[in-house]
Image (cartoon, rainbow, N blue to C red):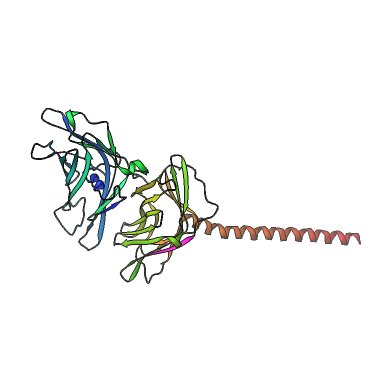
Amino acid sequence: VYFRPSWLSGSGLLLLCLVLGADQSHALEYNLTDSSNATCLYAKWQMNFTVTYETTNKTYKTVNISDLSNVTYEGSTCGDDQNGPRVAVQFGSGFSWIVNFTKHAPNYLIDTISFSYNIHNHTTFPDAEHKGIITIDNHVALKVPLNDIFRCNSLITIEKNNVTQHIWNILVQAFVQNGTVSTKEYLCDEDKHSTTVAPINHTTVPSPTPTPTPKENPYVGNYSVRDGNSTCLLATMGLQLNISQDKVSSVININPNSTGVTGSCHPQTAQLRLNSSNIKYLDFVFAVKNENRFYLKEVNVSLNLANGSVFSIANNNLSYWDAPLGSSYMCHKEQTVSVSRTFQINTFELRVQPFNVMEGKYSTAEECSADSDLNFLIPVAVGVALGFLIIVVFISYMIGRRKSRTGYQSV
């Protein structure tokens, strides 16, 4: 299981988020009651996730799950003397969560969590190689004080068994006393020490708060990812991070000489991960679309700010750097990738090729519109200059000829 960012060292706190799932735009809210109609468990949350699966032609496809419609809670129970509460959530086409809680005074525990999805569904998973229901089971030991409601607004990302989840705005309390949900909150560490933003469900981001720009542009670095003995991803770019937090703006230029590089390459996705002393990770995730083009689909970042806080954010609904498969994308001019209202990345001298790299070299580049406009303006400018020169020469000739005629008349 791969979690990012981590919340509490040595704890299973992140696994709480496996309890929860929701639509990108609308929160799920569930109030579980006992036989006397008194609340025994309360939960509210938001979530989206992706599932990567193998197809019949041995390629991989990624499905985005953000529409949690047709939600039911069949099998949910307040528990009894032998068994603790259980929340069972069913949604969409064959997706389900089942979460069991146990009591260990003065705390309660999230005991077991399972997530299931039906890959036999041809509508959601077209051309899937494997069929049937896939279940992911977890045994966790997360302690939450009894009579407290757990809150975590911070965004987290969870990866396990080809499933990536983004969860945020979490509220949960099990073993509710006397049917009254507590007002005393138990906060996750991320809410105490960091500023985070939920995923964005669109690619057009409103204009960000103006941020000061360093006098110097960042150094341009060359990055690569290898798959076995061959290079599978190439990237050349200068990176400048712009962060707005609590009305305070920060600008960070990434130094490629002190930046680590890792990543991975798959038939349908590729990832470039950068890290340094203050950057836990900066992920650029590329994807294939329409079987013949690639684009930047996702950016994830977690970094330490100068004030000691942790800034984390993710957006898996981007659409930048679009180019045909087998080529590279290039843009010499400065570009801005708007990840959210509070986080933007400025790129300089950009060139990337996340798929079909041959002999470790870039393929023919598709230029960005800004560069194309510049290339168009150069011959136009040259033509205008030549035209102006011709006009000047012609005027000079006419003036000289006129003076010559005046001289002959004098004689």
Horizontal side of residue 307 vs 58, given as left or right:
right
The quarter holding residue 385 reads bottom right
Residue drawn at (12%, 39%) of the image: 84
Question: In x, y percent, where is residue 249?
Answer: 47, 44
Residue drawn at (71%, 58%) of the image: 392
The quarter holding residue 403 reads bottom right
Horizontal side of residue 370 vs 40, given as left or right:
right
Q: Is residue 228 magenta?
A: no
Question: In x, y percent, where is residue 346?
Answer: 46, 52
Which residue reaches farthest front? Answer: 106
Which residue reaches farthest left? Answer: 82
Q: Is residue 265 above or below residue 243?
A: below
Which residue reaches farthest right? Answer: 411
- Is the C terminus in the top left, top right, bottom left or bottom right quadrant? bottom right
Magenta stretch secondary structure, dominant: strand
Q: Is residue 176 above or below residue 21?
A: above
Q: Nearer the viewer, residue 311 or 211?
A: 311
Q: Nearer the viewer, residue 116 or 384?
A: 116
Q: Is residue 75 above or below residue 346?
A: above
Residue drawn at (44%, 61%) of the image: 258
- Is the N terminus in the top left, top right, bottom left or bottom right quadrant? bottom left
Horizontal side of residue 322 vs 64, given as left or right:
right
Question: In x, y percent, where is residue 290?
Answer: 31, 56
Magenta span covers which residues?
A: 218-224
Q: Nearer the viewer, residue 14 or 228?
A: 14
Horizontal side of residue 342 vs 401, given as left or right:
left
Question: In x, y percent, where is residue 27?
Answer: 27, 38
